[in-house]
Amino acid sequence: MSNFVVKPAKAAARPAQSPSTTPTSYDVAQKAGVSQSAVSRCFRPGSSISPKTRSRVIAAANELGYFPNAMASGLITKRSNLVAVLISNLTNLYYPEVLAEITRRLSDRGIRVLLFALQAESDVDAMLDQVWRYRVDGAIVAARLSPAQLLDFTRHRVPVVLYNRFGEGAPVPSVCCDSMGGERQLVERLIAAGHEVFGIISGPDDSYVSQERVRGAEHWLRESGREAVLVKGAFDYESGDAGLRALMEMTDRKLDALICANDLMAIGAIDCARTHFGIAVPQDLSVVGFDGVAPAEWASYRLSTVRQPVRRMTEAAVSMLIERINDPDLPPEVRTFAGAFIEGTSARFDARADSPA
Amino acid sequence: MSNFVVKPAKAAARPAQSPSTTPTSYDVAQKAGVSQSAVSRCFRPGSSISPKTRSRVIAAANELGYFPNAMASGLITKRSNLVAVLISNLTNLYYPEVLAEITRRLSDRGIRVLLFALQAESDVDAMLDQVWRYRVDGAIVAARLSPAQLLDFTRHRVPVVLYNRFGEGAPVPSVCCDSMGGERQLVERLIAAGHEVFGIISGPDDSYVSQERVRGAEHWLRESGREAVLVKGAFDYESGDAGLRALMEMTDRKLDALICANDLMAIGAIDCARTHFGIAVPQDLSVVGFDGVAPAEWASYRLSTVRQPVRRMTEAAVSMLIERINDPDLPPEVRTFAGAFIEGTSARFDARADSPA
């Protein structure tokens, strides 16, 4: 590692005014020979101004290095054009795609993202004070909110849309992928193919998404008179590996179907099955995930999973939020999207000739 | 997919004042029976205020639903406590980790991230207008900036730190991983192990990181009298696959070492070698990457690569930026960090008995 200091550049071309003063709309008006109100209109979308005046204002503004202050405009228009995005597990492979899509869609509408990246879902409290301080126009939250925290959004009149979770207690606008229906697609196919000994690796305790998926998997297994051995994971590759090791001990190595609460753990479990136990996937062990992240499609995995329709879901979240910024009295609405079953090759879905089923 | 509307919650407990009016510091001062200046001091970090007054102010503020307005404070203190982060390729597996680390480190210092997620490195122009409008205190940029765009940062007096790229033309504060040194670690070992026919898969044309890594690899190959066949990639899994297919045609399948400009393409190339060509990695083909992303460590790949010290680099970027926010006249400084060589198992680094070398 080397640190070195390079010489400062020669003084760059500076705008005309004193370097310590930020130019104001007054300076621009003086320079352009127009009124201050003309300068304001020039920078306010939808205002009427003649092309000639506009070009004089723009020329003067460029020369002075003037730019309208979004924060000051926000104080006047009561709109900051900022939306808070609270997201946990940015390194979880699913959320970067969600964040990129949400940011792009808001940006297309002239709205900026104030990012709050949480270490854990339950880490929200410390962030909320900051959300209120920046007078965001609204918030999209992919993290766990308590009923009291949700009430705070109401008190601060900040419209909120939950992503992949429901409000607990009171109804809250939210966009979800249907966990119950998604697990049904996986579990019913696994049962039809004759699998008998089921294991489940859950996500972390404070994850709503994990709870819903595990609840779904257990529900559909019970419907067919099956039970599963459950071990706790953390939504990461390592806990897929550790989870399979634990299950192999608990089931005396008879495990023949493994349901993972997300793709990343399924990938960890597949690698562990092959390299640690020498188990063939899917011939001797079927492994399924949930999410449809990019690595699930890689040739080493070809994961059998349920893909969340991220584009439709993020578009829904953004348009629901904007509707509520424009009309805060809209009633809560929950939009639930079905996930797409991806057959993949990590699970056996055909009934075997020698199967007892 | 089902959409359904749920009934609105019963009117939640509302703060005392009219729902259409946001409470001000004046309202809080009245309710608490203190001066408006006491309310301001209560919410300004480092201001002196008695514990008794503070608790009265907090109680009144909570009851009224008052929160200090960060944007209004910003107009007074000339600090928005916002830092713009411009980042391209959020779905590239390397950048989510960088973004999460930068966001956490800024957040620890009470600074929020205004996120600009670019579709391509060259997509910066449209974003910059927004950067100026929000009067950010500074910017961290992991995207390509032209000399004119860099000059704009000077004109708008927004301190900037570049992440993994240098300023073109004038020196600019930047944090980099040493591409030349990293490629040297890979190339010299590959040559020592007797590899003869080299291929390189680059990143996209507008990527500075790709240019530096390819330049480094070609330089160290030339130093040993070797050349490489170069094909163009896009930093994604698919272009690793496509790149290997192209190279196998161009080299009449004699390729024995593949240098990929990032890990994700190396992973795509390994999967292609194994599943499409039936080539054993590393016995018949050595594949190396660059970055050290999480999937590079997965058991299916165990990539031979150079890992960027993301924590040290993000900490350096954040502290350099904060120094320059506090003192805009500090000279530009470039901090270059060495990457760590990760041996992995995707490349053969031992000299073969039958090797001609």
Image: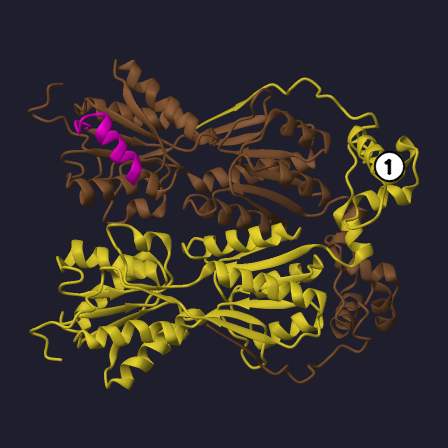
Chain colours: A brown, B yellow
Q: Secondary structure at mark 1?
A: helix
Magenta part of the chain: A241-255
User: Residue A121, position in %: x, y?
Assistant: 52, 36
- Position of B213 relative to B279 (above/below): below
User: Residue A210, position in %: x, y?
Assistant: 42, 30
The quarter holding residue A153 reads top right
User: Residue A247, position in %: x, y?
Assistant: 25, 30
| Quarter in which the C terminus of chain B is drawn | bottom left
Whether residue B77 sits left or right of residue B143 in the image: it is right
Whether residue A261 sits left or right of residue A126 in the image: it is left
The quarter holding residue B322 reads bottom right
Instruction: Write down the residue under mark 1.
Output: B53
Q: Amino acid at mark 1?
A: Thr
- Position of A75 relative to A171 (above/below): below
- Position of B295 relative to A233 (above/below): below
Identify which residue is drawn at 34% across, 39% down: A239
Identify which residue is drawn at 51% across, 39% down: A120
Whether residue A262 sits left or right of residue A35 in the image: it is left
Q: Chain of mark 1?
A: B
- Position of B242 relative to B151 (above/below): above
Identify which residue is drawn at 59% across, 27% down: A146
Whether residue A250 is in magenta: the answer is yes
Identify which residue is drawn at 53% across, 42% down: A87
| Magenta highlight: main SS | helix
| Quarter in which the N terminus of chain B is drawn | top left
In this view, the residue in front, A61 or B309, is B309
Whether residue B133 is in magenta: the answer is no
